[in-house]
Amino acid sequence: MKIKYLSSASVLIQDGNSSILTDPWFVDGEFYGSWNNYPPCTVNLNELENIDGIYISHIHPDHFSVKTLKKMNKTIPVFIHKFHADFLKRGIERLGFNVIEVEHNTRINIKDDLHIRILAADNCDPSLCLKYFGCGIAEKTFGSTTIDTLCAIDNDNEVIINTNDCPFQIAEASASKIKNYYKKINFLLFGYSSATAYPQCFELSDDELQKSQQEIVKKFLSQGESYINLLKPDFYMPFAGRYVLGGKNSNLEKRRAKIELEDALDYFQNSSIIDHTLQKGLILNQNSIFDIASGQSDQKYIPIDKEEKNHYIETELFTRKYDYENDEDPKIDDFLNLIPKCHERFESKRNQLNFSSNTKILIHLPENKILLLHPNDSSPEIIQKQNTENFNQYLSIKTDFRLLYRLMRGPQYAHWNNAEIGSHLKFSRKPNIYERGLFYCLNFFHS
């Protein structure tokens, strides 16, 4: 088998005349316009017209990229896990594709000798992946959402494992099943970085920011080490999460908890807990190919020029507009009309989870107004901004009012989780502690 690296979590896996593409994201501007590829994507979609399948791991837009899939051949079958909720399936079908749902841990044929096995990630816990709103919009408890998946692709002889965005602590059980099924794993693809709004979108001191950045980077690198040590592949490649922020929030890029891909590889190659005589790390240029049989790539990797990257962000990406920036500016009355239904849904989810908190939720509205939510059965209030100065336990959320109006109108316009991941929401909280229930309930604060 051969692996061609395309962008972020997207690779083309080829075996003879058979092929499957993973998580295609080639069109900039996902997460309402803020996420962009770097290096700039040069994938030729015409070369992907006749592939035999597409694997989409989960619903986040850098994996399920609507903007990309709209440009692709709709006769290509799309393989996904058979999730409990069918929102990913319906989303792909709306684009005109035929979706093949794969039962958990079931190996099915793609074409000729090429097969795929898809496993759901278990024991979902947003404190591990740091996507604070959580991803399971159908979740009924604080249990598993099976929102993400990992997969094994094989040709009866060689095996490629793709863990996507799955944090090791969530997916260890599923990864162990794969390890027990295959005698040998030839190639491992795994994520190496965070895709979260923390810390760049949170009000933190310089010391808190630096500490958070270091802790998060180390956390995700440690997860990569754990995957390598569990699966013991011949070769491994960190990938996925290789994005840069554009638009008016591109200045947050320097506050993100991130390192360059080559710095991640350097960490793994110098790790004292990886057996470097057995596991060899590599990364590929965009459109470069690695041949598993020969153990060779067709190009020498070219490291990112950081000055060139910063120049591209400042001159090219900064000028780009977000999806909602062409909307009309909403008025305060537009929000007041939505609040009753939003609060009804919020309360329904809060009661469903049996969650209560003394933390006040402050959502900034036009005209220096604040929407005050009490997650404890009390009614919402509209107060003046200056009346919040003495609050000692709160979560404050600011965003562009045009996006907020979309969020409050419903997920078909914008979803809180995607707005957070896209770095569109600015947070301040006191104390600086993550309350999972607050964010889960806010997912349902829409009409």
Image (cartoon, rainbow, N blue to C red):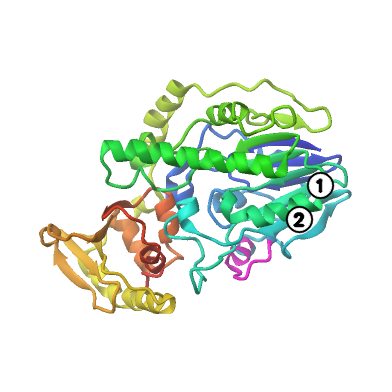
Residue 433 magenta-highlighted: no
Magenta region = 81-92
Q: Quadrant of the C terminus?
A: bottom left
**Residue 374 at what x, y percent from top left?**
26, 71
Q: Is residue 136 left or right of residue 211?
A: right
3D distance between C-alphas at marks 1 and 2: 9 Å
Q: Is residue 366 left or right of residue 270?
A: left
For label 1, the residue is: 154
Which residue is depicted at the point 57% across and 61% down?
147
Residue 297 seen in render: yes
Q: Is the residue 39 above or below the residue 395 in the image? A: above
Which residue is depicted at the point 28% across and 73% down?
339
Q: Quadrant of the N terminus?
A: top right
Residue 285, located in which quarter of the rendered image? top right
Front residue (pair 265, 26): 265
Q: Is the residue 241 above or below the residue 109 in the image? A: above
Front residue (pair 300, 264): 264
For label 2, the residue is: 117
Label 1 sits on a secondary structure element that is strand
Instruction: Please rate how many residues cluster around mark 2, counting C-alpha atoms within 10 Å: few if below 14, some from 14 to 19, many from 20.
Output: many
**Residue 152 at what x, y percent from top left?**
74, 50
Label 2 sits on a secondary structure element that is strand
